[in-house]
Amino acid sequence: MTLLEFASGPGLQWALWIFVFGVVWRLIGALFLLARKDLSKPRRHNSVAAGLGAIWSRSTPAHAFEKRILFQHVTGYAWHFALFISVLFFAPHILFFESVLGFGWPHLPNTIVMVTAIIATAVLITLLIRRATHPVQRFISNADDYISIVVVLIPLVTGILAFAHVGGRYETLLALHLLSVEVMLIWFPFGKLMHAIMTMPARYQAGTAFGRRGVKA
Amino acid sequence: MSNEAMSLQDFRGLLEKLRAGIAPREMSDEERVRRAKKAFMQKLNGHRAVDLDSCLQCGMCAEACHFYEATQNETYAPVYKFRLLRRFYRREMSPMRWFYRVFTPDITAEDLQNWQHLVYDACTGCGRCDMICPMGIKISASIRVVRHGLAAAGFVPPEMRVLRNEQRDQNTLFGVGAEQLKALAARLGEQGIDVPLDREQADVMLLTTAVEVLLFPDALAANARILNSAGADWTIQSDAFEATNIGIISGDDPTMKLAIRRIVDKAKACGIKTLLLPESGHAYQTMRWEAATEMNESLSFEIVSMPEFIASEIKANRLNLKRQSNGASVTYHDPCRLSRKGGVTQQPRDVLEALGMEVRETPSNRRENYCCGSGCGEFVMQSSANLRQKAFEIKKGEFEEAGADTVVTGCANCRINLLIGAEKSGWQTPVTSLVETVAANLAD
C-alpha cells in the first residue's frame, strides 16, 4: 500500500470515524448534563426567537466594544470566509464531497480559490503570531490553542503546495495533504476546533437566558 | 428633607471594625479542595458545561473588563478567572475527561487561595464580559461558580464572611435589624411620612436595606413618599425587610436560600400582590430572577424594582410629578444587575424624562454599561480598594464625556462606590438616587 493509498483509504476512514464519534460523544456529554428548570416569570416568552436571534447577533460585536476588538473581528471574518471558500468551492474538493455525499455543487475558478487559500494561510499565521505575542492571549493559551491552529495550518499549506506542484512529487504532496486533514479530523473533537459545532448551542442558550430577562443577547 | 445619615467616613470605620473582629478560617488543605470540588460539582450544570466546552480562549472578554482595562493585568482577563472551574470540568466531568486528565493539573489549596483575589477583588460579577463573548458564554456565571467553590473552601474575604454570618445567624446586617428600622420609621413619621410597619395584610411589600437605613435613609423616605403619593396599599416588615443577600454575594448557598426564604414566607403570609425592591441591583437579580428557582416554587406575587414601579405609576397617571423646566441634565448609571442582568433599562430613563430632565448617555450604556467598579458588595472589601478606584476612573471618564449636571443611579451599592470614588479623586458632579430624584419632584 502506498502512502497515498493509505491516506485516501483506511487513514481517511478511521479519521472520519474518530471525528464523528468524538463530536457526538462530546456533544452528548455537555448537552445532557441537567440544568434546573427556571421558575422565574419570564419577561419575554418567545425563547426560541431569542435563542435564534443570539446566533445572529453574536456575529457582530456590540457598538461599545467595536473599537477594542476590531482586529480580532476583522481577522475572524477574513479567516472563516477564506477557509470556507477554499474548502467548499475548490473543484477537486467538490469531487471528493460528491463521492462521499452523492451530490456536488458548482466550483469557483482555481485561481480564485488559490488566492483565498493564501489569504486564509496568511491570516492564520498572523493569528498564531498574535497568540504567541499578545499579553492576554499568550498568558491564557495552552497546548490546545497552538495545536488547533497548527493542525489547520498544515492542510492549508500542503494543499497549496500540492496544487502548485512545489516541494515534491504530486502524489506525495497529495498524500501529505490528505494525512494532515486526517490529523485535523482526529484532533477536532479533542480540542477547541469543536467550537465549530458548539457555536450554535452556546449562542442559542445565551439568547434564551438573556431573552427571558428581556435583554438582547 | 434630610434624615440623620451615617457619614461615609463613619461607615468606613464600621467596616474597619468588622475586619478586625474575624480570624482566618482554619481547615486542612485536603478539606478545602474537597469542599471546593463538591461545590463545583453541584453548580456545574448543562449550561455551564456548554459554556466551558465552547470557549475559544480568544481573550476578547478582557477588553470588556474594567479591571483589565484599568490595569492591563492579563490575569484579570475574565477567561482566566474561571480557569479553575474549567480545569475541574475537564478533569472530572467532561466526556473527554479520560483524555484531559493526562495533562490537566488537579486543583490545589494554593490555587484556591490565589483565585480569591481574582474572583472577589478583581471581579464585580458585572457581566460586561458576557456581552462581548463571540460564543455567547455567560462568563460571569462561571466565575460565580468559582466564588461558590472558594466560599465552601473558606477562602472568602473577611468582611463578607462576617456579614454572611451576621445575616445568617442574627438576621441583621451592620447591626441593623428590626429595632433600627422601627426607629427610622418613627423618625420619618415625625416628619409626616407614613411608613406602615408590620401590617398583617397588604398589596405591596417594600424591602429596604441596612445600607439605606444607615447611609441613605432619604431613599427609604423617598420610597415611602412615592408609595403614599400613588395611594398604594403597602407595608414594610421589620423582621423581613433586608433586600441585601450576602449569601449570593459571597457565594454561600445556605445563607442565600435562608435570606430569600425569610422574604418569601413573609410575603406569602401578608398575601401581597407585589414585592417591591429598593435600589439594590443584586437584590433585583436575586429576587426577580433567582428566588423562585432557589425556593423551587412558582411565586404568586409579582417582583418589581422601584424604577419599574414608578414608570408604570406615571403611565397610569397615579403619580403627580412636577416637570422641571430649567433644562437640568442627568446621566443615568445603569446598575449591571438591573440592566444587562435584569432587563430594566428603559424605565428609569422614562422616569427621568417624565420629570422634564434631559438624559445624556455615557458612551457605553444600558447593556454595555461600565460597572461602577464595586458591584456585588465589593465596597465592603479593603483588599480591592485600589482596584476599585482605578475602575472608577474609567467610569468618571464616561460621565465626563456625557457632561450632565448630575449622575443618577438605581442601586445603593453603585451609589456608594461612585461617592467614594468621587471623594477620592476630587470629582464634583453630584451623585444621587432615582427614587430621591422622583420624591423631590412629587407634586404634593
Image: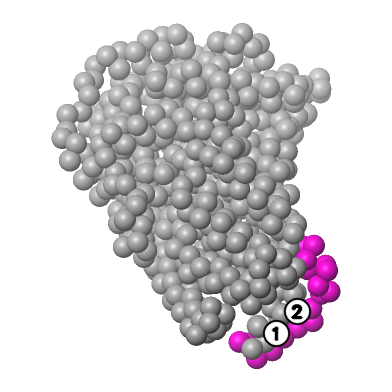
- Chain letter for mark 1: A
Q: Where is residue B130 in the image (x, y as percent from the top left)?
A: 55, 46
The magenta segment is A100-116
**A179 over B310 or under it: above or below:** below
What colour scheme was applied to this rendering of the protein? one colour
For label 1, the crowd category at 10 Å Cα-Cα, with few meaning under 14, some 14 to 19 and many 20 or more, is some
Residue in front for this viewpoint, B97 or B428: B97
* B36 or B190, nearer to the observer: B36
Left or right: B316 in relation to B105: right
Q: Is mark 1 on a helix, strand or loop?
A: helix
Locate residue B245: give its quadrant. Answer: top left
Which residue is at the far bottom?
A102
Q: Do the residues labelled 2 and 1 touch (CB within 8 Å)?
A: yes
Q: Where is residue B152 in the image (x, y as percent from the top left)?
A: 26, 40
Residue at image location 67% in from the left, 64% down from the top: A167
Q: In this view, does A190 lie to the left or right of A195?
A: left
Q: Is residue B27 left or right of residue A42?
A: left
Mark 1 highlights which residue? A95
| Residue B152: assigned label | none
User: In this rendering, is residue B160 above or below A9?
Assistant: above
CA distance separating discs 2 and 1 = 6 Å
**From where the camera sits, is residue A31 visible?**
no
| Residue pictured at 32% horizontal, 47% vertical | B105
Camera-side residue: B277 or B414? B414
Q: What residue type is labelled 2?
A: Ala
Q: Which amino acid does label 1 sit on?
A: Leu
| Residue B156 magenta | no
The numbered disc on residue A91 is 2
Q: Does the magenta stretch include residue A108?
A: yes
